[in-house]
Amino acid sequence: MRFVRRPSLGFLALLVLAAAAAPVLAPRDPTEMNKTATLRLPSWGNPLGTDQFGRDILSRLLYGARIALAIGLGATLAAAIVGVPIGLWAGWQGGVVDGATMRGVDTLLAIPPVLLAMGLVVMTGPGSLNAGIAVSVVGLPQFAKLARAGTLTQKRMDYTEAAVALGATDRRILFRGILPNILSPIIVQVPVAASRAILLEASLSFLGLGTQPPAPSWGLMVSESRNYMYAAPWYGTVPGVLIALTVLALNAVSDVVRARRRG
């Protein structure tokens, strides 16, 4: 019933299930070409039609969802796993360590996300893996900032001073004491960061720096459809709508989590 009451949760659940069951649900191999069936209208055999190479669009959307979710969630988790400890350590140490660490984080924040990701991919080479790494680097500063802000508040609490007086190690204080008390804003940030990661991956693929042909990607499909917008308007519209709905659903989930945490 919760999925019914929360359309965003229902949509994301269906998207995850569809991506997981892509080999079963996909009518065709997503990379299978058929020159005799290019840009076909939607039909029973091809529910969303075919692209300029005769590949089934629905199959490519389903497999593209795997890439979008893998990079979106994987890059977000990687950014959190690296960024949160950096923020914890910087906030706890203070002084020169905090200043130097945060100047590095601020430098990453000062560069527009797309430009930063493009620069990283250009240095490492295009592809889904390198795009995922670039997306995780772009998302790292937000988690570091959140963790640092929470640590600066919690380090002044009585329980932290008591732990220091009892001789607890920095690692124990940070990960057993402070981290559980600052998880709420970090958890709220995860869906937002995942939506940005999916959008950024789609942007990189659109520019030819992310997922490479013939592998399916929503951003790549939008890019490839530009020359066929009049002949086959559904070709680029459907992946574009999926990207938008996924981003909106993840942001809505973040709002739900924030409301429940406050309640």
Image (cartoon, rainbow, N blue to C red):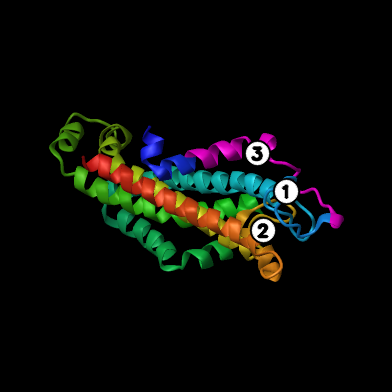
* Relative depth, front residue between 186 and 109: 186
Q: Residue 44 at x, y = what percent?
A: 72, 45
Task: Decide: few, some or many residues near mark 3? Use Cα within 10 Å; few <14, some 14-19, many ≥20.
Answer: many
Query: At which x and y percent is residue 234?
Result: 64, 60
User: Can residue 242 be seen by looking at this rendering?
Assistant: yes
**In the rendered view, would you say 228 is above or below 5?**
below
Q: Amino acid at mark 3?
A: Ala
Which label was assigned to residue 161? Answer: none
Q: Amino acid at mark 1?
A: Asn
Q: Earlier in the sequence, mark 1 or mark 3?
A: 3
Read off the residue under disc 1: 46
Q: Which residue is mark 3?
A: 22
Q: Earlier in the sequence, mark 2 or mark 1?
A: 1
**Who comes first in sequence, dot 3 or dot 2?**
3
Q: Quick one: SS at disc 3? A: helix
Q: Residue furthest top?
A: 166
Mark 2 and mark 1: span between their CA atoms?
Answer: 30 Å
Q: Is residue 236 above or below residue 88?
A: below
The quadrant holding residue 173 is top left
**Is 10 placed left or right of 168 in the picture?**
right
Q: Quadrant of the C terminus?
A: top left
Q: Which mark is residue 126?
A: 2
Question: Over which residues does the magenta segment extend?
Answer: 13-36
From the viewer's perspective, is the residue at label 3 or at label 2 nearer?
3
Q: Quadrant of the N terminus?
A: top left
Q: Position of residue 103 (x, y in %)?
A: 36, 62
Residue occupying image coordinates x 59% and y 61%? 237
Q: CA distance from mark 3 to mark 2?
A: 25 Å
Residue 144 drawn in magenta: no
